[in-house]
Image: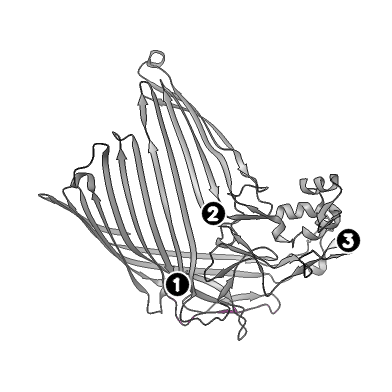
Amino acid sequence: GDLMLNVNKTLGDYSIGANVGASLSRTHYRQQGYQGGLKAPSNIFTPNAIDYSQVTNDNRPIYAETRHNINSMFANVELGWRSMLYLTITGRNDWDSALAGTSHESFFYPSVGLSAVISQMAKMPEWINYLKVRGSWASVGTAIPTNLSSGARYEYDPTSGKYTTVTYKFPDEFFPERTNSWEAGVTARFFNNALTFDLTLYQSNTKKQLVTAPYQVDGYTEAYVQTGNIRNRGIELSIGYNKTWGDFTWNPTFTFSANQNKIIKLFGSDVDDSKNLISKGGLEGLSTILREGGTMGDLYSYVDFARDAEGNILIQDGKPVKQTVSGNPRFLGSVLPKANIGLSNEFSWKGINLGFLITARLGGIVLSQTQAMLDSYGVSKASAVARDNGGVPVNLGTMTAENYYSVVGGTNPIWSEYMYSGTNVRLQEAHVSYTLPRSLVGKLGVTLGLTASNLFMIYNKAPFDPESTASTGTYYQGLDYFMQPSLRSLGFSVKVNF
């Protein structure tokens, strides 16, 4: 529930808008069920396709319950002067049960912003119709997931048939995640408002972000760690044009955004780790590794060709030799793009409206285990081309497609051979519509339209859609493992206004 009091007042050249309030949130989750291993069928009509030696009898009831309470108080005030200068200050304090038992159950996060319409404060050239600058700073707090601060966690062991304490090491104390950010920007309109311009620069630093890290000490396997400092900084740019010549209107818009992610400090002062890295999720022989100076999307391969002192691939029994490198994995690149670009165009003429959007992702790498599996079975385009060409060039010779791809591909491939640029350009959207003239429909307003999205790729080197993802998890971006293909959609609409 929420309770809020609002105040809006104008005093001469000054205006004030303020609100103060409180919020209560109560979440109660309960799960009851029964789970366990496969049981042998009790009737003789079931096909005998069950390996009875693998049948387990660890069937058991399950029960889970979570309660999460958040009490909040908040306030904000906006002071204005002559509708051209604004100062905004906000503050919020949360009491979160996820941090119960710690000294950080209560945490406060403020923000402040200032904006000024320069075109109203000073005389501008005639070609500048509007000019506004803005800047803000904010601190945002987020609690940890529920049921962690107690440190008591259990999991079922099917071997013993009992619930045992999990092998996670908990820190001495949990902290709320904290993101401090600043933003500065300018908005402008030129040439009788035909040309629009918007530029934003930003930076955010996130501290105490919760992750798990391998921890092979005192019987533990993993430890909860709250990271030191993850920085994101970037730019967002939008340029638009809107011009009419008689019955014809053209409205193009160009957008550009770029974000630089960097791990400034991986661990806080409360954690001592000489390796200063965390290995996260991935696929077999492939992992996202977090290191200071790197990004949250850096991929490393533990599998590579074995080579001699001159860099030639070692060959044994007519096949390349593959080796596992555990101590010094090979850096492949980051899945994070360097930039994103969009270009939209809207045209209208006498009731006909036509528009399209082209988008581009620039940079970043993607990897495909689907391609590796197809290669290993000899059913891919690459393996077919290799057979037609008489083999695959290796060192100064040629190797049969079967001998090469049976080693390079598969479930544990040499990942550098299945790494592709994530850069792609596509026709993202297109639409056309026609508004019937009044002479045909009278007082009604009738518009017929066709729309389409994700029509086709203009440029793409990867064997799959780099924008698709097999998982919503942070550390599984850019990885293709028999994902569903991306979809193209078509639509038809009829709009009637009375």
Residue for badge 1: 208
Q: Name the element at disc 3.
A: loop
Q: Amino acid at mark 1?
A: Lys
Secondary-structure class at tag 1: loop
Give residue 78's position: percent from left, percent from top. 22, 56
> Within the magenta stretch, is there residue 346?
no
Which comes before the other along the chain, label 3 or label 1? 1
What amino acid type should be assigned to the residue bearing mark 3?
A: Gly
What's under tag 2, amino acid-wise?
Pro
Residue located 30% across and 38% down the image: 190
Instruction: Write the start and end of the magenta stretch as one range.
Output: 160-175
Task: Kindly identify which residue carries mark 2.
Answer: 337
Residue 100 against residue 386 in the figure, above or below = below
Q: For residue 318, which numbered disc appears in the image?
A: 3
x%, y% of residue 118? 23, 48
Determine the CA span between mark 1 and mark 2. 25 Å
Crowd class of label 1 (few under 14; some 14 to 19; many from 20; radius 10 Å):
many
Vertical arrangement, residue 240 with respect to residue 12, above or below: above
Label 2 neighbour load within 10 Å: few <14, some 14-19, many 20+: some
Q: Is residue 101 something one can see in this rendering? A: yes
Q: Quadrant of residue 184?
A: bottom left
Q: Residue furthest bottom?
A: 218
